[in-house]
């Protein structure tokens, strides 16, 4: 009898220790390429963990500096190795099948709203265009492991692919003509590249979402981030973080998106779950709803 009581006491102490243990969440800082946009995703992850503290307990975010690990490889590590616990990336059906998914768009539709980087010597050529459909006649650059690449190819673009770190150099060398970038991306990328400019008249959009992904076995973390982000949406802190981010705020001002002629293309590579998510108004920035919302 004393043995049973002792075992029960030990078990209770162990369970209590687990309940009070901090969730350590490791993520890749993508040191191989300078990307100031990472700060937004890290802040959003911190917000989600903070909002879920009452239910799930304390947490610690731990940055890992993994050198020369591009997007696709990072997601493979997340799925198959005990190295990182979470990563942010544009979604695809394959990624959703491989990983645990937090079905809340981190950029509120911005990932599917695209501006074009072009070589400055091509500015006059594109200035003469009247119909955005004519953009399909030009070559585009895209990452070799990006979900966007298949979308562009399916819609008839001639696509040149490479590692992320080489694409701007390739555009400077005029190895393709258009480099589609999400609404918040191009401005900082061309600060030190005088040969590249943001094309001023056109834009492109398609249904796309940026999600947090976790290891498929880590259902606790998936639920925790989901519940934390939902709470942040409900109390307005998600929206405040979104609009207070310097890069996003500047992009919304500089892009003049609503004044541009827009090429809207379909994305046949989104899941039914992501289609339904993008049709949920609370997840999408209102001026982009007509642009990135997929057909039902």
Image: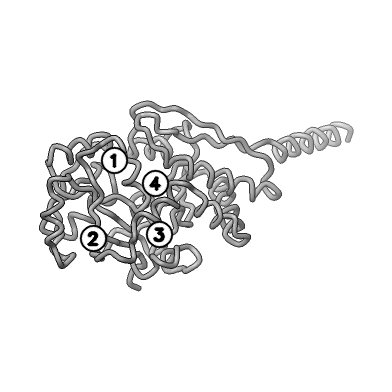
Mark 4 near mark 3, Cβ–Cβ under 8 Å?
no
Quadrant in which residue 115 is drawn: bottom left
Q: Nearer the viewer, residue 181 or 78?
A: 181
Foreground mark, 1 or 4? 1
Q: Nearer the viewer, residue 178 or 78?
A: 178
Q: Which residue is mark 3?
A: 109
Mark found first going from the N terminus, 4 or 3:
4
Foreground mark, 4 or 3? 3
Q: Which mark is residue 89?
A: 4
Query: Whole-percent x and y of residue 129?
Result: 13, 62
Q: Residue at x 71, y 49 (%)?
A: 54
Secondary structure of residue under mark 4: strand
Q: Which residue is mark 1?
A: 190
Secondary structure of residue under mark 1: loop
Screen quadrant of the N terminus: top right
Instruction: Give the CA distance from mark 2 to mark 3.
Output: 18 Å
Mark 1 near mark 4, Cβ–Cβ under 8 Å?
no
Q: Which mark is residue 94?
A: none
Secondary structure of residue under mark 2: strand
Taking 36 as reference, is 61 left or right?
Answer: right
Quadrant in which residue 23 is drawn: top right
Query: Whole-percent x and y of residue 127?
Result: 15, 58
Up the image or down, 292 lies above or below 212; here it is below
């Amino acid at each position: 009898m004393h043995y049973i009581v002792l075992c029960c006491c030990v078990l209770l102490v162990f369970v209590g220790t687990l309940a009070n243990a901090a969730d350590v969440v490791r993520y890749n800082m993508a040191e191989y390429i300078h990307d100031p946009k990472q700060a937004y995703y890290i802040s959003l992850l911190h917000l989600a963990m903070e909002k879920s503290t009452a239910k799930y307990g304390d947490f610690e975010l731990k940055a890992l500096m993994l050198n020369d690990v591009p997007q696709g490889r990072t997601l493979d590590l997340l799925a198959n190795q005990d190295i990182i616990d979470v990563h942010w990336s544009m979604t695809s059906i394959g990624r959703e099948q491989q990983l645990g998914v937090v079905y809340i768009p981190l950029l509120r539709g911005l990932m599917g709203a695209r501006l074009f980087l072009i070589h400055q010597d091509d500015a006059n050529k594109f200035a003469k265009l009247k119909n955005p459909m004519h953009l399909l006649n030009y070559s585009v650059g895209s990452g070799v492991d990006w979900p966007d690449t298949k979308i562009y190819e399916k819609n008839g673009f001639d696509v040149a692919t490479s590692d992320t770190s080489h694409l701007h150099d390739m555009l400077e060398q005029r190895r393709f003509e258009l480099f589609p970038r999400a609404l918040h991306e191009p401005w900082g990328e061309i600060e030190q590249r005088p040969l590249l400019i943001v094309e001023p008249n056109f834009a492109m959009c398609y249904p796309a979402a940026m999600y947090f992904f976790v290891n498929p076995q880590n259902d606790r973390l998936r639920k925790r981030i989901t519940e934390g982000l939902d709470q942040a949406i409900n109390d307005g802190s998600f929206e405040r973080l979104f609009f207070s981010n310097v890069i996003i705020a500047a992009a919304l001002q500089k892009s003049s998106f609503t004044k541009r002629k827009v090429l809207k293309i379909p994305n046949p590579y989104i899941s039914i779950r992501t289609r339904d998510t993008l049709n949920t108004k609370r997840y999408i920035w209102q001026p982009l709803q007509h642009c990135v919302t997929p057909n039902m």
